Amino acid sequence: MVVVGAGEAGAGAVTALREGGWTGPLVLIGSEDSLPYERPPLSKAFLVEEPPPGPRQILTSERLRELRVTTFFGRSALSIDRSRRTVKISGGANVPYERLLLATGASPRTLPPKYGSAQNVLTLRTHDDAVRLRAAIKPGSKTVVVGGGFIGLEVASSAVSRGASCVVLEAGPRLLTRAVPEVLARLIQGRHEEAGVQIVTSASITRIEERAEQTLIILDDARVFYADMVVVGIGAEPNVKLAEAAGLSVDNGIVVDETLTASDPNIFAAGDCCSFPHPLYERRLRLEAWRNARRQAITAAANMLGAHQIHDDIPWFWSDQYEETLQIAGICPDQPAVHRDLGPKGTVLFYLDHDSKLVAACGFGSLGVVAKEIRFSEILIARRLKLSPAALADPTMNIKSLLVG
């Protein structure tokens, strides 16, 4: 078994393969010259904690030895020979496989070259990126974030928490346009503004340039923002070049079936790079989410061993900003929601289908309260229970009690 990609999905897969009973050769190939580590802390704890925590390793050297995994870290997979079932990696080696998992992840989008270039503009994906960003966001410094999505807002929260000033430039008419309902996005914007973050929506950048030791971001309405560091958080693109070159089907990710099998029965995909059909939402999804990578790794590993499991895990996302949390279970549709007002502890929105079954829930507020609401919502979604909108809207109704139907 060979796994390409040593992030959350790849590391989880080698563990699941060995624990699932695979006793033969097991290979993990990763382009970064480091042990697999978790990425979610890079925009949160790593930027604010003192002293800075080291990378939170998913697999230690000891655990890899215990699992009897042959590793190629700091080596990139260059090509796949599907007829010979080999993967060519940098350095010249050809690694044979019986089953291959592509867990190649995604890469941050960058600004188009027309905006110009500057030294102090970065994206945040790797531990090295986070080290550089942390060095820049100190008391009195200026950070400009391009993009009002999850990563951008987590960086903004971390920056002002460390005494830096921060401006968020969002091209859309509001924050979090891709996955978060407008009513919650406005609550989140209010929390950031309360903390001192300047939010600029409908922002159109025309030029980025360096002057003296600062970076200038110039908008089309002639406004100019100065920064010691510019962080670009405008989404990510799936890493599919290896799959495309191998002739696999690709469409906003490596196309797989419900068992995470690619268009070659000996090749599987999992994590941020994977476009998969979800039976509940009846459409293809590609999720850039920590838990999705972890859960898909387990399904893919089982199916590499012949289990034929369908992957129907309920999507779940979270983002911690300041002392509050944003959590989403399911995929929020563009339709009216049932509101549960938890007062100062937060707000939760519930989305029902035409049959009064819950399909998604989204909440923002106190970590303990919102996490509980979303955790039980996730179970309600999975069980496909019919629910009363009035009960969902009633903040005195314990959501756990709805599990009994």
Image: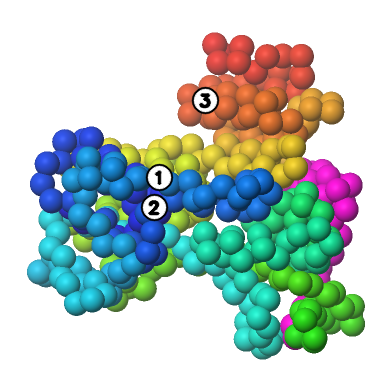
- Where residue 181 appears, as percent x and y from the top left, is 72, 46
Question: Disc 2, disc 1: CB below 8 Å?
Answer: yes
Furthest-front residue in view?
Answer: 51
Image quarter hosting the C terminus: top right
Residue shown at 54% from the left, 11% from the top: 404
- Where residue 400 appears, as percent x and y from the top left, is 60, 15
Mark positioned earlier in the residue sequence (2 or 1): 2
- Residue located beneath label 3 in the image: 379
Residue stretch rendered in magenta on the structure: 181-209
Mark positioned earlier in the residue sequence (1 or 3): 1
- Residue located beneath label 2 in the image: 36
Q: CA distance from mark 3 to mark 2?
A: 30 Å
**Left/right of residue 137 with respect to residue 317 in the rendered view:** right
Q: CA distance from mark 2 to mark 1?
A: 5 Å
- Residue located beneath label 1 in the image: 58
Mark positioned earlier in the residue sequence (3 or 2): 2
Q: Which secondary structure lies at badge 2? A: loop
Say if the magenta span includes residue 322. Answer: no
> Mark 2 is on which residue type?
Pro
> Mark 3 is on which residue type?
Ile
